[in-house]
Image (cartoon, grey):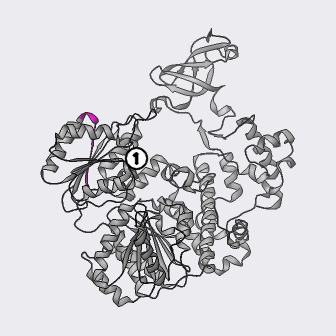
Amino acid sequence: MNNVLNQPVSVIRGIGPESEQLLAELKIFTIHDLLMYFPYRYNDNRIRNLAEVEHEERVTVEGIVISEPLLTYYGRKKSRLMIRVMVGEYAITATFFNQAYVKSKININDQITITGKWNRHRQQITVHSYTLGSLENSKITDFEPVYSVKGDLTVKGIKRFILLAYNQFSQYIHETLPRDYIKRYRLYSLKEAIRALHYPQNTNDLKQGRRRIVYEEFLLFQLKMQALRKFEREHQKGTTIDYDNNLLKKFIASLPYPLTNAQKRVIAEILKDIKSPYRMNRLLQGDVGSGKTVVAAICLYAAVTAGYQGALMVPTEILAEQHAESFQAMFESFNINVQLLTGSTKKKERQEILAGLLDGTISIIIGTHALIQEDVNFKNLGLVITDEQHRFGVEQRRVLREKGEYPNTLFMTATPIPRTLAITVFGEMDVSIIDEMPKGRKPILTHWAKPKMLDRVLAMMEKELNLGRQAYVICPLIEESDKLDVQNAIDVYAQLVHYFQGRFQVGLMHGRLNGEEKELVMRQFSENKIRILVATTVVEVGVNVPNATMMVIYDAERFGLAQLHQLRGRVGRGDQQSYCILLADPKSEVGKERMKIMTETTDGFKLSERDLELRGPGDFFGKKQSGLPEFKVADMVHDFRALETARQDATYLIESSSFWKEQEFAFLRKYIQESGVMNGEKLD
């Protein structure tokens, strides 16, 4: 945008100091801010056929007045005016609340256009606005923009200010996108797009205006991200890991299962990164059970063959133990020293481990956040892997990364973040996805049952237990809460103990137990001493019990789809058919839809896309730590194709030399520079 539009709103004729103050409350300071303050929705004022209108939907209709207005007063200064109107074949009632003055303006046989909320059952419209005569002769537009306002500023007021700005300064709106891109995607010019969003002529006009602004918002955001990536890659030293390919092939051949094509693909991507002079910063996504752990082991071994050490940080002690056991088994015949470091490691053993890391005799360390304590130092750390990365804060991840001289970093997650979000939120990382399950995995059969069917569910569980199998029972909260009327885990435990009458051992695990108590319960379940484990969501991450074939989730509607999927992934880890039963009685349509989706697919990525559509990106990550960008018009979920396109374009531009020199890219370059990326400042 040029300097004229960067002037304060006070230069607009018709906007005085008081109005300037009102606009400042909406963070509108310049003419540019005002022109780019877009409506958050549009009222559709086109005439509709009442047969097609939903109950309680907003509608505009045209008709003839067929009764005298009837005015009644109730309460203090409250009135209701009712008239009968013939709309097509419908004789409906139009009701005006607290608009007594309308009575003198309307007569029988008048033609009237009314807009309001339609009550299908009562055949009545509660009138929001009206105009005498047909819509064609009125000043009402087909699409009426609705703006977000606060304080003393009204929608009418903001519309007036925007019109003043547009009439006086629209000739200064200069193009910001390169000509080629406008031509290639047949985009409106910026001036046309601003006009179309504030004053749309028809549906297509509005659509094209929006399309232009969406693309620009995404392109600017992605340019910032890609520039940050380029800057970090070129200005941060990396550790080049020149691994021994022959040794690596031998190790892969020794694994009990062949790698899937998806595993081979992501391993190739990671190995290419660690061999480059740049520092790897990659996110590895893989559904529960897709084989991320094996990928981690192969990459850590690659680092070891080049004389480097590797670290794997996981969120729970149980998970750290399981990883350490499986890694020690995998590396046993390769003479690799793998150690475990957690908060429970005894003092003497801890001292030995710290010494081994410092002198390099320990090649691979697996642990919890105990790894990032100050006295943990490495001789030659080359690769850092963080599992379930969203459970560690940015700060914790940074501390581990700084334990070595520029080690390569890999973040792993089993939470299938939709690609749409991954490329946006983790835009400065490369993203690898394992989108294929190992052969022979039986899909978990998922059923949705109402709570009244509990007896049938328990009978099914007993059948599984009689076959020697085990079961999880998940409860959302551990103690009674006034806010949430949830089934208490302790109650469920008591209920199951009573039901099974000592035939099967029932265990209880929840967040109030200390580390050792949890450890004991988990160990007993792993060793098949406990047959039914009642637990809160503490089992979501970090247990591998192949003998568990059934999971029952109480109050399933209280969980997000991604979380339900994570929980479900605790079963189905052995050769037997596994089952997940969702006990739920959701009242809302969205709640019912979510239960239905869970029974229809076991694909975590499909589920996460649906979860995102139903809940929105803020809820998906939790608003506080999401770091999601705020867009004025664009929506990352609904406009994800435009997001992908903008990302590809941004990547191409940042890497091309012409982008950094030619005049037509000047605005985009200036935007990146003003974002602070090129100074190496980390962006929000």
Q: Position of residue 594 (x, y in %)?
A: 37, 45
Question: Is 644 in front, or is 608?
Answer: 608
Query: Percent x, y for residue 225?
Result: 60, 67
Q: Is residue 449 magenta?
A: yes
- Please tell me in which quadrant of the rendered image residue 500 appears: top left
Q: Is residue 224 above or below residue 51?
A: below
| Residue 287 can be seen in this image | no
Q: How many numbered discs sit on the rendered protein?
A: 1
Q: Is residue 681 left or right of residue 304?
A: right
Outermost left residue: 466
Q: Which residues are magenta?
A: 440-452
Q: In which quadrant of the rendered image does the C terminus lie?
A: bottom right
State whether residue 184 is above or below residue 391.
Answer: below
Q: Is residue 613 left or right of residue 474?
A: right
Structural crowding at the residue carrying mark 1, measured as other residues with C-alpha within 10 Å and reported as few (<14), some (14–19) or many (≥20): few
Q: Nearer the viewer, residue 513 or 420?
A: 513
Task: Name the residue: 73% across, 66% down.
Answer: 674
Secondary element at tag 1: loop
Q: Residue 639 at x, y = what percent?
A: 53, 56
Q: Is residue 677 above or below residue 467?
A: below
Instruction: Give residue 418's position: percent from left, percent from top.
Output: 45, 59
- Which image quadrant: the N terminus? bottom right
x 32%, y 85%: residue: 335
Residue linked to disc 1: 512
Q: Amino acid at mark 1?
A: Arg
Which residue is at 37% across, 52% downward?
538
Above or below, comparing residue 79 to residue 21 in the picture: above
385 or 499, which lies in front?
A: 499
Examine the structure image and report whether residue 604 is included in the region drawn in magenta.
no
Residue 427's quadrant in the figure? bottom right
